[in-house]
Amino acid sequence: MRVALVYPEVYDMARFKEHRREFPPFGVLYLAAVVEQAGHTVAIEKVTPSATELDLRGYDAVGFSLASSATYGFMLEARQRSHLRDDALVMVGGVHCNFYPTTSLQDFRAHVATDGESEESLLEILGRAEFKRFDGVAGVLWVRDGKVRREPPRPLLRNIDDLPLPARHLLPTDDFVIPDRLAGRDLRMAHVMFSRGCPFPCSFCAAGQTRIQYRSGVSARKELTHLIDAYGIEGFAIVDDNFIVNKAKVGDICEQIEDLGLQWSALSRVDTIDAPLLGKMARSGCIEVKYGMESGSEPLLKAMRKNTKQEQIKRAVFATADAGIEAKVFIIHGFPGETRETTEATMQLLTELDSALSRVSLFRFVPLPGTQVYDQADRYQIHGTHLQADWDGDWSKFHIHHNERHWWGGPEQWAETEQTYRMLREFVETNWNRQG
């Protein structure tokens, strides 16, 4: 069977529309690898805001990957404008579809939608392509007699080591080997995923699943060795939602890759790391850990359901610097309830961390679809979601780079949010000479 997997060009979502390529479409790459392994012919087709009309008539099955809500609008345009065979199987999946599968199924006029991990579901779907009946296929929604049927959820894969390596060979090399995305170094690097999911309940985050799954150190080494041999990489960045959670699993990966001579970076919470683990990471080539600090205000951190403390932030950042690893923090300004007092608390904590911080990235709060804040908009005084009466149909507004939309509260609250953001931005740019 000839299968096309269609995805939106995934630039760094922090710089959406600026054409700053960041990481490849891992969801599609894993699906493509599984489809190839099963003996099908697969191609990956790219959609951009300026190129939404594709000729897909050469494929028996076409899957639209909704990688983010910010790209939902032009992916929908691609479905409407592209040319498919009348008898082609149409599938839809991805992050946005996981949050809103019924509307995704209907909007894309698809025969079937996947909800959750899709590797096993996709193979079963392709096996039923001729008759387009999907009863009993776990983790899917499909239309029968004009009604949407939801099948039982699909359990998570027991061992993600069993998956083939992502099918990077189906993309141009420049789409995944990048020279300048590793902690400011000019190194030939690639992005990798060594785990799936995040067990923490932050109300601003749209994590796809809440149970974390790790690959083994042997599996991680296999992929990195392949990337060295095939593409000559000198480093890598781990793009997992929250890689550093299980210390034993992370330690296993560090021990397995220590002799490869690669430099690398990863994301972490401040409350899941300690000095011994940082030592292992440094010995295996880690040069930067990026922490989701978010705010210096403990009441605001509690409101975000981040539930971390100032002392935990300080302990993690200073321990990282002591291990010889650079520490970068992400700040989210403007979460509902942000005030001058909470902003000043953030500035004060950054001042205390100054000597130990290498970089600070400042973002404005955006209510991302699929988050608690988005789905409980009235509770947070949020407006402008697709679930509310004032919805304007513009999905592209859910990007996180210099997003200046008035998302919550009344005019006075928003005026204070605007003023304090400018104050914090100037502080960050002055002290770290960069933003983003």
Image (cartoon, helix red, strand yellow):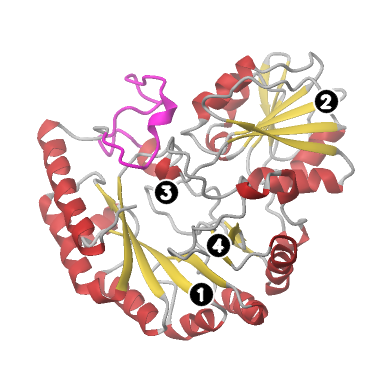
- The part of the chain drawn in magenta is 376-404
Q: Position of residue 343 (x, y in %)?
A: 16, 55
Q: Secondary structure at mark 1?
A: strand
Q: CA distance from mark 3 to mark 4?
A: 18 Å
Label 4 vs 2, first from the N-terminus: 2
In the rendering, which numbered label is found on residue 37? Answer: none
For image coordinates 73% across by 73% down, the residue present is 218
Label 4 vs 1, first from the N-terminus: 4
Residue under numbered circle 3: 205
Mark 3: amino acid: Cys
- Report crowding for label 4: few under 14, some 14 to 19, many 20 or more residues within 10 A (C-alpha): some
Q: CA distance from mark 1 to mark 3?
A: 25 Å
Q: CA distance from mark 4 to mark 1?
A: 10 Å
Residue 35 seen in the current view: yes
The N terminus: image quadrant: top right
On screen, 393 above or below 273? above
In the rendering, which numbered label is found on residue 60? Answer: 2
On screen, 267 above or below 373? below
